[in-house]
Amino acid sequence: MMRTALALAMVAGCLGHDGLPINPALGVPGFPDCVNPSLAKKSPLEKAIHELACSQKGTDGQIKIGTVGDSITAGVHSSGGNHTYPGQLQILLDASFPGKFAVTNLGACGSTMLKKSNSPYWERPQFTTLKNGKWDIIIIMLGTNDAKDTGSGGPDNWLHNCGGPDHTTLQGCTFADDYLSMISLVKTLGTTSAGPKIFTAIPPPLMAARSIGANQTVINSVYPKLIPLINAAGNIGTPVIDIFSAMGGTPNWKETFPASCSLETAKTYTPCAWWCDLQSCDQCHPNNDGYTRMAHAMFAGLELGDGCKSTEYCCPDALHCLTPTKQSCLTEECPNGQVCCPLTKICVIPGNSCTSSCLDPGSYCCPDAKACLTPTHPGVFCNASAPCGAGEVCCPLTSLCVKAGATCTP
């Protein structure tokens, strides 16, 4: 607790351009796996980002994962340490596969996939570490800074040649061309001749227009369509990791998003709580809770485990697959080996890590109904002698009366 408070105090007192907090240990925003040998020079940010010396983590025998990205991957607006998404991903991997994986944070603040922009990833030290290493798994999540344009108050990066939200296409799309060039390069960087397993990720939503000089429509409407097209064209054989949806993105974001996230909107609009709390409130970079959620989505997207079975549900609080028992913990403690689920008030057996696709933290995704279900009387089982009320149904998995909400993917 004291270390976290100290890290926050150090970060809060040192801001770079665009108001991004500077990591005093590096002289740049974020927490990539790098050092700055020239830190004592106190170089301006534009120079300091090129002074970094980054290194691959892991030992012989470990499965090496590289996370390619920008300031979101670097963990800007987290409190540092293992609170970045790569740091949280390492924790999840260690919990499920102790000592088997090593995650390297290759996030470069302000960087773009575009080779011609105000700050190409291709020219950053993190890229040098990427191409000089040998990897088993690479996660690519770039695009947020590519979406910057003059109309949004940013640099002239986005060329508006990918068809827009209604006619998204790879034809003539410079961003897609450069993305596919990255995929082609990464295919040569494997620990075996087969190359690394490559995952593309749709960036998280931008919660307010012009907040970083980026075009909100490009991020929230174009990328959810464009990244899957790039993934297919790259022939990498893995599913797209949909961070956009996991972090609250939706096709009708213009109607559902507040004008911006704040401490007040975080009380009423669940996704805003992943950006705004007393630790941090930014429209582009998540807070610690948001990065934790992002890591769970990445973990699930890597498909290293079996996911939740049809006899389990994903707890939105614990973020683990839970097997319900027929014992209520509303008034009694659970036996050894079981825990009390705070949402359902049922004794459950925890399983694999998971990410709930239900935005409402008061609901769980039913694998049978494929709907988000909200328990109306947690801990009270329904049966023929105790039927559910009007507008409720008895969930066959938990035997609780519930109200059905939005559709979901178990």
Image: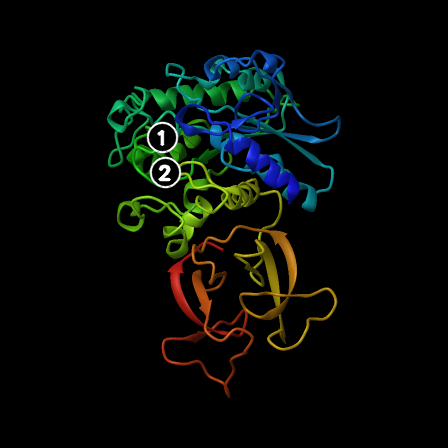
Residue 206's label in the rendered image is 2
Residue 238 shows up from this direction = yes
User: In front here: 396 or 350?
Assistant: 350
> Could you classify mark 2 by the number of other residues whose Cα lies within 10 Å: few (under 14), some (14-19), or many (20 or more)?
many
In three-dimensional space, the C-alpha distance between marks 2 and 1, rounded to whole angstroms, equals 9 Å
User: In front here: 268 or 371?
Assistant: 268
Give the SS element for disc 2: loop
Q: Is residue 34 above or below residue 266?
A: above
| Left or right: 396 in relation to 333 | left
What is the x, y in percent for residue 333?
68, 73
Q: Are marks 2 and 1 in contact (CB under 8 Å)?
A: yes
N-terminal of the pair, mark 2 or mark 1, is 2
What is the x, y in percent for residue 196?
59, 27
What is the x, y in percent for residue 52?
58, 16
Q: Is residue 228 above or below residue 25?
A: below
Residue in the picture at 32% in, 39% down: 208
User: In front here: 103 or 308?
Assistant: 103
Residue 182's label in the rendered image is none
The amino acid on which the numbered mark 2 sits, given as a three-letter code, is Leu
Task: Identify the image quadrant of the N terminus.
Answer: top right
| Left or right: 374 in relation to 220 | right
Residue in the picture at 51% in, 33% down: 12
The amino acid on which the numbered mark 1 sits, given as a three-letter code, is Ile
Residue in the picture at 41% in, 53% down: 270
Q: Is residue 8 above or below residue 360?
A: above
What is the x, y in percent for residue 342?
57, 65
Residue 199 shows up from this direction = no
User: In front here: 233 or 26?
Assistant: 26
Give the SS element for disc 1: loop
**Can you identify the residue that label 1 sits on?**
212
Residue in the picture at 27% in, 28% down: 152
Figure disc tally: 2
